[in-house]
């Protein structure tokens, strides 16, 4: 039987205790993100309410407040998911009779709009980053479709020059209060072995030779390909800022590092690579994420037809 003191627990008190348990089952970055949502969006609205007095209307009020602040559907949806997960455990632990958050519909999150990338765009990008500190890293992202956390966490032991492959088995992220944290991929699909295109193989070979030249010895398998301070990998934020600087000097509009990954997807899809193959190369968990690149390619084809109409006066 649950003690009365426990039943009179407020939402804020419960969520603090719940995160202490929940953080053990999720990645550090995820736990950090959950805490931020709880602190910024949930506690200010319903934190003082007792768990056994909470209503679905109060849960709706959390989403309404976020909408008034102009927050994205993705942010609102994640907040509601956190409430659902937390209150599921509250019911399981005998602190609530019903998970009222499940009475509230989750907002629809539209698919991310992918900017089309042509071969000309990719070449201009390579020219913009030529000679910069992180040029090899940008080339790997563009030619292999890597996430920024994946490329920053690469070690020399991940490269098999004889087989011509690169293994993706970890990622690095910055976590508040902990700095850079290297961890395993979030999903099984993200753990993959990629064949190296000639450009990527050449870049890695040059980096390897340069490392030997500077050290007078070959790098160890545990050494990061792109080292940062001390024994840590390079900071993804530094890589991002380096790209913005290069684009600015070249007169190219700013873009996120993820656009390099999107460029990989649209370029391969435009060359006829199947969605299934592209899904495996990108490490997607669902084909639904991959079909977006086909839609972008279709858009490019439609634009090309329009250009022809204009040229022929149609």
Image: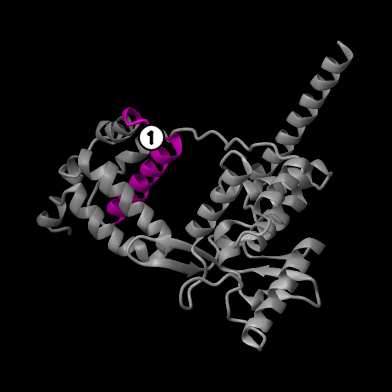
| Residue 245 seen | yes
**Residue at 71% across, 58% down:** 144
- Residue labelled with disc 1: 71
Can residue 197 be seen?
no
Q: Which secondary structure class fits the magenta region best?
A: helix
User: Would you say 58 lies left or right of 105 here?
Assistant: left
**Figure quadrant of the N terminus:** bottom left
The structure residue drawn at horizontal position 71% and vertical position 51%, both measured from the top left corner, is 126
Residue 60 sits in quarter:
top left
The vertical placement of 314 against 125, above or below, is above
Was residue 71 drawn as part of the magenta stretch in this picture?
Answer: yes
236 in relation to 167, above or below: above
84 vs 153, left or right, is: left
Relative side of 309 to 4, left or right: right
Percent from the top left, x then y, of residue 197? 79, 61
Can you give x and y, in whole percent of width and height, for residue 86 in the image? Answer: 32, 51
Q: Which residues are magenta?
A: 67-92
Q: Is residue 89 magenta?
A: yes
């Amino acid at each position: 039987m649950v003690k009365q003191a426990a039943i009179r627990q407020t939402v804020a008190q419960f969520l603090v205790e719940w995160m202490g348990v929940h953080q053990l089952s999720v990645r550090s970055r995820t736990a950090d993100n959950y805490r931020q949502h709880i602190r910024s969006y949930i506690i200010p609205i319903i934190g003082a309410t007792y768990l056994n007095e909470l209503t679905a209307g109060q849960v709706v009020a959390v989403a309404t407040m976020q909408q008034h602040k102009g927050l994205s559907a993705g942010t609102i949806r994640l907040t509601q998911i956190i409430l659902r997960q937390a209150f599921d455990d509250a019911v399981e632990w005998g602190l609530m009779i019903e998970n009222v958050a499940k009475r509230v519909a989750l907002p629809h999150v539209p698919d991310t709009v992918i900017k089309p990338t042509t071969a000309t765009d990719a070449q201009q990008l390579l020219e913009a980053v030529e000679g910069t500190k992180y040029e090899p890293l940008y080339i790997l992202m563009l030619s292999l479709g890597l996430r920024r956390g994946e490329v920053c966490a690469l070690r020399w032991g991940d490269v098999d020059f004889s087989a011509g492959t690169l293994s993706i088995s970890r990622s690095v992220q910055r976590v508040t209060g902990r700095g850079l944290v290297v961890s395993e991929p979030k999903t099984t699909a993200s753990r993959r072995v990629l064949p190296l295109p000639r450009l990527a193989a050449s870049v890695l070979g040059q980096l390897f030779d340069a490392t030997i030249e500077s050290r007078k010895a070959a790098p160890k398998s545990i050494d990061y390909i792109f080292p940062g301070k001390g024994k840590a990998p390079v900071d993804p934020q530094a890589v991002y800022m380096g790209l913005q600087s290069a684009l600015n000097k070249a007169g190219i509009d700013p873009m996120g590092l993820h656009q390099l990954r999107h460029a990989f997807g649209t370029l391969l899809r435009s060359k006829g690579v199947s969605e299934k193959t592209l899904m495996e190369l990108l490490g997607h968990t669902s084909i639904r994420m991959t079909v977006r690149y086909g839609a972008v390619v279709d858009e490019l084809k439609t634009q090309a037809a329009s250009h022809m109409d204009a040229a022929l006066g149609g």
